[in-house]
Amino acid sequence: MDARFLGIAELAEAPSVAVVVDVMRAFTVAAWAFAQGADKIVLAESPDEALALKARHPDWVALKDGPPAPGFDTVNSPGLLRSIDLGGRTVVQKTTAGTVGALAVKEASLVLCAGFVVAEATARLLRTRACDSVTFVVTGEDGQADEDLACAQYIARRASEARTDAAEFLLRAGESRAAAELAKGVRQGVHPDDVALCLELDRFPFAMAAALEDSLMVLRPCAVPSLTDK
Ligand SMILES: O=C(O)[C@H](CS(=O)(=O)O)OP(=O)(O)O
Ligand SMILES: [Mg+2]
């Protein structure tokens, strides 16, 4: 598999297959939302669009990163989200990096959103679809966020070599600037378990695919055949 690793600003044209990586914390949060029963996640272009969608659909759950904000129901924290029942609900998510990265590749024919919690399912989906050229979007810090790059490199390796050990990739993510800032309370809207939850390898069995639906970018869980199903 030919893998390219690009920051959001480096995306010149729509790739055919994109894996958008945000370990801390957008796509760890998204995976937890599905685990808590969410039906779908609408990736909003801006806080204003998220609030407008919420105003049109009062039953939707709006979340954004940073501290709690007026009009939003919750924040971009897996530790906080895991105790909210989202059964059948639609979530609207707006974050600084992850949701922006997914919207930047909305014209791609396949867009997967990933973190370590769905790494193996994502890699297996790439394998089963025999994707030979994949663009990994490293969403944090202008493409330099090591937690995202490490996860992207791990998924790329797993997509071609099933026997890759995750330890060194998880170690890099644990030593990243984002992990340190979340642990020190520099970032806001944080639960003390957030870093550990973002580093849980393969916590969930599903991948997550985003696609345009009536001009909105919608993320949904995507079942992946397990090794024993093949
Ligand atoms: O919520 C997050 O972790 C970040 C925003 S910040 O760096 O904490 O301000 O957003 P994300 O898009 O999930 O990287
Ligand atoms: Mg991030």
Image (cartoon, helix red, strand yellow):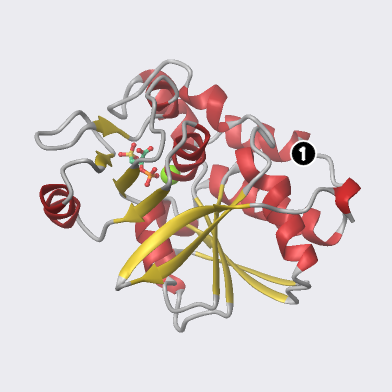
Label 1 residue SS:
loop
Q: Residue furthest bottom?
A: 13
Quarter of the figure with the N terminus: bottom right
Residue at point 25%, 61% (across, down): 45
Picture residue at 25% right of the left edge, 35% below the top: 66
Among all residues in the image, which is located at the extreme front?
Answer: 88
Identify the amino acid type marked 1.
Answer: Ala
Q: Quadrant of the C terminus?
A: bottom right
Closest to the observer, 186 or 116: 116
Q: Does residue 32 sit above or below 209 in this rendering?
A: above
Q: Position of residue 144 (x, y in %)?
A: 50, 53
Ligand 2: which quarter? Answer: top left
Q: Position of residue 79 (x, y in %)?
A: 43, 22
Residue sitting at 75 percent across and 77 percent down? 132
The residue carrying pointer 1 sits among few (fewer than 14), some (14 to 19) or many (20 or more) residues within 10 Å by Cα, namely some
Front in this rendered view, residue 217 or 153 = 217
Residue 55 appears in the rendering: yes
198 sits to left or right of 184: right
Horizontally, is 179 left or right of 201 in the view?
Answer: left
Question: Where is mark 1, residue-wise?
Answer: 166
Q: How many marks?
A: 1
- Between residue 116 and residue 145, name the one nearer to us: 116
Determine which quarter of the picture holds residue 72. Answer: top left
In the picture as drawn, the residue positioned furthest to the top comes out as 192
x then y, percent, for residue 176: 53, 36
* Ligand 2 closer than 8 Å to label 1 CB: no
The answer to whether residue 94 shows anywhere in this view is: no
Q: Nearer the viewer, residue 63 or 95?
A: 63
- In this image, 120 relative to 40: left or right? right
Q: Residue at x 52, y 34 (%)?
A: 35
